[in-house]
């Protein structure tokens, strides 16, 4: 038997598989912010984040968890990459939000990670979000991408 205690072995086998890739995902998002010439600011607002196309600025609310920060950044970056402009029209706004969520989900969730998470956690969205280290909104968006159009 190895000299490792059972608790050390257990902690290794229960760690989520996305732990090491979460930092990599955040680093990739930050590179995309730079590549697109965007400015990132941390400032409170009415929502967890926002994108201002006129100022080419993404705003993130302070005090969010790393998982939420990464998910919100990916969502707001989606607005920027998809060239969304603010709209007061409800249908346009909903469509843009869905598109930004889908873009973010594609950046942060791989088919392999989703399949592994579902095998471990089942279909429960909050559990999947925890396992994938993203928000429930991005799990919902990813699941929508899996459904055939029509």
Image (cartoon, rainbow, N blue to C red):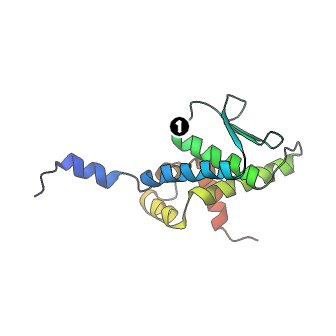
**In the rendered image, is residue 122 in sight?**
yes
Total marks in image: 1
Q: Residue at x 53, y 50 (%)?
A: 129
| Disc 1 element | loop
Q: Is residue 32 above or below residue 119?
A: above
Please identify the quarter of the rendering in which residue 82 is found: bottom right
Image quarter of the N terminus: bottom left
Question: How far across and how far down the image is residue 147, in percent?
Answer: 66, 68
Please identify the quarter of the rendering in which residue 42 is found: top right
Q: Is residue 127 above or below residue 117?
A: above
* Residue sitting at the far right: 89
Q: Is residue 94 left or right of residue 77?
A: right
Please identify the quarter of the rendering in which residue 102 is found: bottom right
* Residue sitting at the far top: 44
Question: How far across and how far down the image is residue 41, in percent?
Answer: 67, 34
Question: How far across and how far down the image is residue 4, in percent?
Answer: 16, 50
Of 125 and 86, the residue lying toward us: 86
**In the rendered image, is residue 127 in sight?**
no
Bin the neighbour count of mark 1 within 10 Å (Cα to Cα): few under 14, some 14-19, many 20 and up. few
Q: Residue at x 75, y 50 (%)?
A: 79
Question: How far across and how far down the image is residue 99, in percent?
Answer: 74, 56
Q: Residue at x 71, y 29 (%)?
A: 45
Q: Is residue 14 left or right of residue 142?
A: left
Image quarter of the C terminus: bottom right
Of 40 and 126, the residue lying toward us: 40
Q: Is residue 114 above or below residue 49?
A: below
Q: Residue at x 85, y 51 (%)?
A: 92
Which residue does the numbered mark 1 point to in the structure image? 65
């Amino acid at each position: 038997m190895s000299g490792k205690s059972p608790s050390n072995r257990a902690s290794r086998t229960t760690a989520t598989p996305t732990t090491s890739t979460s930092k990599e995902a955040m680093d990739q998002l930050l590179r995309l912010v730079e590549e697109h010439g965007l400015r990132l600011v941390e400032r409170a607002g009415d929502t967890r984040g926002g994108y201002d196309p006129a100022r080419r600025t993404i705003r993130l609310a302070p005090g969010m968890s790393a998982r939420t920060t990464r998910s919100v950044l990916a969502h707001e970056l989606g607005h920027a990459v998809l060239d969304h402009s603010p709209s007061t029209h409800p249908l346009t706004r909903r469509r843009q939000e869905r598109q930004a969520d889908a873009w973010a989900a594609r950046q942060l969730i791989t088919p392999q990670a989703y399949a592994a998470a579902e095998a471990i956690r089942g279909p429960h969205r909050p559990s999947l979000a925890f396992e994938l280290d993203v928000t429930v909104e991005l799990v919902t968006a990813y699941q929508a991408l899996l459904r055939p159009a029509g």
